[in-house]
């Protein structure tokens, strides 16, 4: 015997089955990347860099991707230079996340980024002044 499930019932079923993790909207193809303008603090810029960002929510996880293209150069200091997260993180004591910063021009890793959910920030590693293009990819719990 087969049971025909109406779309609204199917969505409700998927929500019920996947409450703690995988999002039903991903099964239905309704997820998408959203653009946002990353707010940076503690970066040393020569010229005005082009900074673009996008984020995607899947279940209780937020993935972010950021591109930094310097006008002349950028520099960062670990523990001081950071970017504000686009979506509020989950309970600061229990949530986690991680990220990496890459030098796209040189095809090398700059280092690990620290996601401080309690502060709503992602701290970047130290990068000496450079005119190369950089990307940051990270995830954290929401």
Image (cartoon, grey):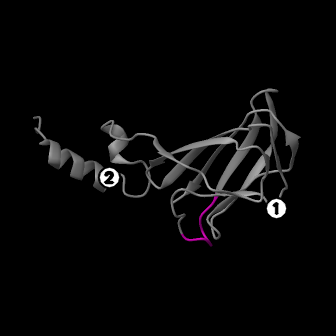
SS state under label 2:
helix
Residue at coordinates 82% horizontally, 62% vertically from top-left? 79
Residue at coordinates 65% horizontally, 61% vertically from top-left? 121
Q: Which of 96 and 41 lies nearest the eye of the viewer?
A: 41
SS state under label 1:
loop
Give the extent of the magenta segment: 91-96
| N-terminal label among 1 and 2 | 2
Would residue 127 be counted in the magenta stretch? no
Asked whether the beta carbons under mark 1 and mark 2 sit within 8 Å of each other, the answer is: no
Number of numbered discs on residues: 2
The rendered magenta stretch, by its main secondary structure, is classed as loop
- How crowded pointer 2 is (Cα within 10 Å; few <14, some 14-19, many 20+) is rated as few
Residue at the spot of label 1: 79
- In the rendering, at what x and y percent does residue 8 appear? 16, 48
- In the picture, the disc for residue 32 is none
Residue at the spot of label 2: 17
Instruction: Check the picture and name the quadrant holding the N terminus.
Output: top left
């Amino acid at each position: 015997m087969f049971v025909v499930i109406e779309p609204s019932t199917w969505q409700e079923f998927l929500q019920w089955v996947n409450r703690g993790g995988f999002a039903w909207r991903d099964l239905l193809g309704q997820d998408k990347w959203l653009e946002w303008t990353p707010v940076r603090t503690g970066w040393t810029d020569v010229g005005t860099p082009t900074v673009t960002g996008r984020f995607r929510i899947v279940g209780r996880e937020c993935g972010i991707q950021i591109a930094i293209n310097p006008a002349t150069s950028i520099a960062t200091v670990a523990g001081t230079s950071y970017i504000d997260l686009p979506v509020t993180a989950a309970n600061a004591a229990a949530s986690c996340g991680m990220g990496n910063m890459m030098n796209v021009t040189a095809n090398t890793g700059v280092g690990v980024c620290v996601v401080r959910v309690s502060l709503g920030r992602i701290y970047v590693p130290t990068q000496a002044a450079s005119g190369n293009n950089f990307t940051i990819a990270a995830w954290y719990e929401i």
